[in-house]
Image (cartoon, rainbow, N blue to C red):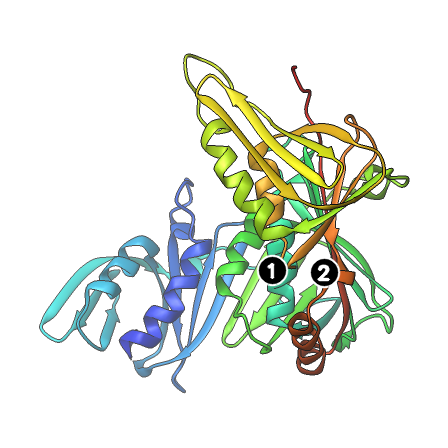
Amino acid sequence: MIVTFDKEILSAAVAPAMSAVSGKNTITSIEGICITAEADGTCILNSFDLEKGIRCTLTGRVEEPGSYIINGQKLNQIIRAMPEDIRIEVGETMRARITSGKSEFTINAMPGDEFPNMPSLEGDWGFTMPQCELRDAMTKTLYAVAVNEPRPALNGIFFKIHDNRLTLVSSDSFRLAICEKEMKFENNIGEDELDIAIIVPGKTVAELLKMLHDDTSPVSIRATGKHIMFSMDNICFFSRLIDAEYVNYEKFIPKTPATYATLSCDALRESLERASLVTEEKSAGQSRSSVKFTFEDQILKVSAVSVNGTVNEELPIEKTGPDLKIGFNCRYLLDALRACDSEYIRLALVSPLVSMVITADESKMTEEEIAAFEKKKENTGILSEHYTHLAVPCHLRE
């Protein structure tokens, strides 16, 4: 195989491929990137760690077609260090000669047919939506995905599509995040009316977020019973699905709140960031302390006490219902507020022992926010969107 690449084009293809290069495996081939060069100049880069994979298509000046595996970490480091166009030569000796200008590297290679078989990238069902909308929904829910949870379902994001409504749900038992978007999906395959429920691993979503653009360019989503594929530009990113049944998350949402409070999202987030200076530190073996909310008249008092010090603040609110005191893990609550993108939020509470519900207060939308959403509807075809965050309270010690 002899092929020459433009450095920027090759670098742009190798960077996402690295997300599926295995770093801890006894199978040497999946620590590499398989480069396949066709006689017509089409080149395909494949990486696959047996859980998720990337296929990137790019063009190169192919002098001799072939397919070989080169260690991903070394290839990536070499490409970034090279000054200009990059020429890769691999022969029967299984040594890859990588040159650029007067720079030259020689590293080991493997035959391309030793690369593990990748799943079929043809889905049983699928649709197309704007990248910015998928990115927004994932951003609002990724923070609540569990890590190494014994219940496999909680280690991923639950995707549900029904009646032209996309719902993403995540939970780690301490918090719950829901994002719903109603829109007309394009280029549907499979069922005429999509009615799907799958669980995508959190690690897959985290890597996909790095690839998605914050614009209206399309992302094609295809899935089978075991895999899901996301295609955008010249990249196809695929992953195994989590084979489990998701929890009945709707039963955890309080149905009869007694106290409602509306306030500025930025003001509450900044207040909690200041409170975290006290709650997030450990000293003398003491664990992290909680932050206390006291809803009293039209004031929210935010306070925290730990071995490191105390913090007290007051925020103006619009409250209906009885006064209430409730405590939360400060970091968990901050994560939820950082996922909110509305200027005003509405807090719904039942009692100090029941989860607090955080939603956007649509009645407080400014003219700028309304105009921005109308423009968004025109550009993306979205009809409506809502988010809900649930924060589980913690015990307060008086």
Up/down of 361 relative to 281, above or below: below
Please tell me which residue is depicted at 65% across the width and 15% down the height of the picture.
Answer: 397
Please tell me which residue is depicted at 13% across the width and 66% down the height of the picture.
Answer: 104
Q: Which residue is mark 1?
A: 119
The answer, for residue 147, to whether it is visible in the render is no
Please tell me which residue is depicted at 60% across the width and 77% down the height of the picture.
Answer: 216
x, y percent for residue 382: 74, 74
Q: Are marks 2 and 1 in contact (CB under 8 Å)?
A: yes
Q: Name the foreground residue: 128 vs 18.
A: 128
As drawn, the label of residue 21 is none
x, y percent for residue 237: 55, 63
Looking at the figure, which quarter contains the C terminus?
top right
Q: Which residue is mark 2?
A: 224
Residue at the far top in the pictured view: 284
Mark 1 Cα within 10 Å, few/some/many (few <14, many 20+)?
some
Q: Quadrant of residue 68?
A: bottom left
Comparing marks 2 and 1, which lies closer to the viewer?
2
Up/down of 57 relative to 343, above or below: below
Q: Secondary structure at mark 1?
A: loop
Mark 2 Cα within 10 Å, few/some/many (few <14, many 20+)?
some
Q: In the rendered structure, which amino acid carries the disc numbered 1?
A: Pro
Task: Find the distance from the CA under tag 2 to the CA under tag 1.
Answer: 10 Å
Q: Quadrant of residue 84?
A: bottom left
Q: Name the foreground residue: 128 vs 229.
A: 128
Q: In the rendered structure, which amino acid carries the disc numbered 2?
A: Thr
Residue at the far right in the pictured view: 256
Q: Could you tell whether 206 is left or right of 324 in the image?
A: left
